[in-house]
Image (cartoon, rainbow, N blue to C red):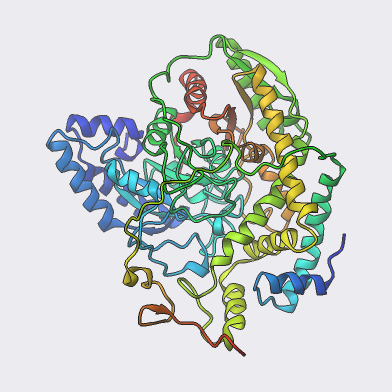
Amino acid sequence: MALTDLSMLELAAKLAAGALSSVEATRACLARAAQVDGKVKAFLRLDEKGALAAAEASDARRKAGNPASPLDGVPIGLKDIFLTEGVETTCASRILQGFIPPYDATVVSLLKQAGLPIMGKLNMDEFAMGSSTESSAYGPTHNPWALDRTPGGSSGGSAAAVAAREVFGALGTDTGGSIRQPAALTNLVGLKPTYGRVSRYGVIAFASSLDQVGPMARTVADTAALLQLIARHDPLDSTSAPVEAPDYREDLEGGVRGLKLGVPREYFIDGMDPEVEATVREALRDYERMGATLVEVSLPHTKYALATYYLLAPAEASSNLARYDGVRYGLRAKDAKGLREMYGQTRERGFGAEVKRRIMLGTYALSAGYYDAYYLRAQKVRTLIRQDFSRAFEQVDAILSPTSPVPAFKLGEKADDLLAMYLMDVFTLPCNLAGIPGLSLPCGFTKSNLPIGLQILGKPFDEARMLRIARAFEREHDFTRRLAPV
Amino acid sequence: MKLTIEQVRHVANLARLSLTPEEEQRYATQLSAVLDAVAQLQELDVSGVEPTSHATLASSLLREDVTRPSLPPEKGLANAPVKMGTSFAVPKIIE
């Protein structure tokens, strides 16, 4: 077994025992990236120096018997949406090319304090708008399970780097499925925590009422351990919840006996890939066999979620992306005459097609005369969608569904079909609208060896129970031990 | 619902995007398709339904108004495309 095939906690145990050093682990990741990233293209930039310096400091702490956290010394990667002081951060957009953040995002500070070497910045859809990494201004990332396919998106670089064992774990962000869908397509565990669970201070904003930061890793326990480091209240983010985080690993082996698991009838739809449906239904039967009770539930407003999302997210994005104006950072069209032309030309050249499309849609939905009909109405429908979940959670402890209606699709396959691409998020985005936590868990493979993800949706701040439900399944199967063939 | 080129130009101006004529055509078609799809929300009765702003808290939280260090000017200006002393420089504002 190669060093880079270890899970985060397996590596941490070896670091704690002195059997390996963080410098060795970091060098192994760098070697692995040198070997495979030409094909996978997960990294936008490596920070070899920074990672090795952090690894050396970690080794010194371990040697002194004074580790900063259980994961001290475990190398990880970051989606290029997190501000990293002194390390270029572009959000995969031309408009931020060359931008060197003057400070760290709160989650980046937390990971640094916990001693994790940060290997570099990972590819994504531009400004997190997309489900395939194809909208990145720097070219798509390739799925380590099948290089001609997408790793999903928008956190596709994070997913591919972890699946290809270039890093041991990563952080992503999830606005409509951007952690869970790529996790499903690359055989990872990916968790979008409750809205407000993790700070977004220093995380480049897409849709502020939906965005949330979360961990991506190869096992359930790793995901829990990584969440533990970032789940805390941050006074610098006014949406951050003052709710104390439990110990996410304490009850991980508690099993599912006696739990009620909801199966929403609206999540088993026509057009779903038959292998995905069969595999997820098999997983549901496994849960029954393990002692859980399956309960059919109804989320009647599910069919309105996509439309609600595609009004709210672009509207908020059009407002958030107004800051990219060529004045304070990033690209400026230098040949423009006058301020107005400079704004228009900078944004025209700096943004890609999908970002411009969503800015246009959002600006239209917020413009005079349309606010009530579009944005306000969508916010009200959002309330109905939240109420659907509240009612369902009166009957059940968690809800199970597929994560993505299809396994990894070929790069280029949906690039020209806007609405088909938006459909990729149909099972994941209601969770963001409701603000509840969602997790994707590897639950099997297609005949052509493409990963399939099971989604577990939970009550607000009930991440510990979701991880326990995920762990019960993981224990019975070898799916999370299977490694991508790259 | 079909957006006209004039509407597209108006929205592009609001969004400060200098679109090319090809983009104006493309967005007229694509935005019309998306607006048709989201028109589905009009069929719901939402009278008496409160809009959601924060999904899990009743409201956002405010912190105590205490001074804390902020970025020094040279750090804040480090990414400026053009600067003048301790200011961001922009092209002529009055045309």
Q: In the picture provided, is A308 more to the left or to the right than A468?
A: right
Looking at the image, residue A33 lies above or below residue A194: below
Residue closest to the far left: A64
Q: In the picture provided, is A307 more to the left or to the right than A139?
A: right
Dividing the image into 4 quarters, which one contains the C terminus of chain A?
Answer: top left
Q: In the picture provided, is B26 more to the left or to the right than A294?
A: right
Name the residue nearer the viewer: A445 or A417.
A417
Looking at the image, residue B75 lies above or below residue A114: below
- Give percent across and percent down for residue A329: 45, 71
- Give percent across and percent down for residue A38: 43, 57
Looking at the image, residue A19 lies above or below residue B2: above
Q: Quadrant of residue A270?
A: top right
Name the residue nearer the viewer: A17 or A70.
A70
Dividing the image into 4 quarters, which one contains the N terminus of chain A?
Answer: top left
Name the residue nearer the viewer: A240 or A60.
A240
Number of numbered discs = 0
Q: Residue at 71% x, 37% y: name it.
A: A383
Q: Residue at 46% x, 40% y: name it.
A: A198
Q: Quadrant of residue A243?
A: top left
- Give percent across and percent down for residue A49: 25, 58
- Give percent across and percent down for residue A336: 57, 86
Q: Quadrant of residue A254?
A: top left
